[in-house]
Amino acid sequence: MSKPNPLNTLRARADAFWQVRTEQERKLLRIGGIVIGLALFYSIAVDPAVSGAGQLHKELPQLHQQAAEMQLMAREAQTLQGQNTIAPTPMTRETLTAGLTARGLNPQSLNVTGEYAKLQFNGAQYAGIVAWLDAIRTESRISVVDASFTAQDTAGVVNGTLTLRQGVR
């Protein structure tokens, strides 16, 4: 004999419960079930949607205000991006030598005339030169006008000449 299905057992109990009820009790149970179903539907689906829409309707002006402020700040940031109120350190032989020495670089020659500088390296580390150039570009607004490098037998070692210019970006 097969084992009774729990779903069939539950259905049989519900049918037995329903059959012993009078027509008036059945009618009240149907109405009560419909009321409970509608209340459950309202509390799960309708009320959150209505209250959420109301809350969003209240918050919308504030969100518009915040968006306008952010757009204003973005425009202000764009206008300020091109401005640099801090004047860079003037390019002198001493400032260039100090930066080179700090990075372990020793140029063969260094000539500074006005806003231009010419350097010559023999047997220098290429990575060190590039790091130094990046630092002076951001700190002092010095850019490379001309560069020429020749690789040496040792990896990462180069001979090179650089022409630098200090100017406003």
Image (tube, helix red, strand yellow):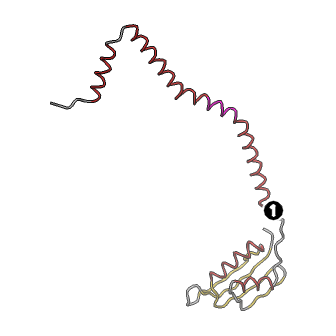
Mark count: 1
Q: Residue at x 71, y 83 (%)?
A: 162
Instruction: Determine whether 24 is above or below 53 in the image.
Output: above
Q: Residue at x 68, y 88 (%)?
A: 121
What is the x, y in percent for residue 150?
A: 62, 86
Mark 1 burial class by Cα count in 10 Å: few <14, some 14-19, many 20+: few
Q: Main secondary structure of the magenta part?
A: helix
What is the x, y in percent for residue 46?
A: 55, 26
Q: Nearer the viewer, residue 112 or 137?
A: 137
Residue pushed farthest left? 1
Part of the protein shown in magenta: 51-58
What is the x, y in percent for residue 29?
A: 42, 14
Q: Which residue is mark 1?
A: 83
Is 162 covered by the magenta stretch? no
> Is 167 positioned to the left or the right of 32 in the image?
right
Q: Residue at x 70, y 33 (%)?
A: 58
Q: Nearer the viewer, residue 32 or 119?
A: 32
Image quarter (top left, top right, bottom left or bottom right) of the N terminus: top left
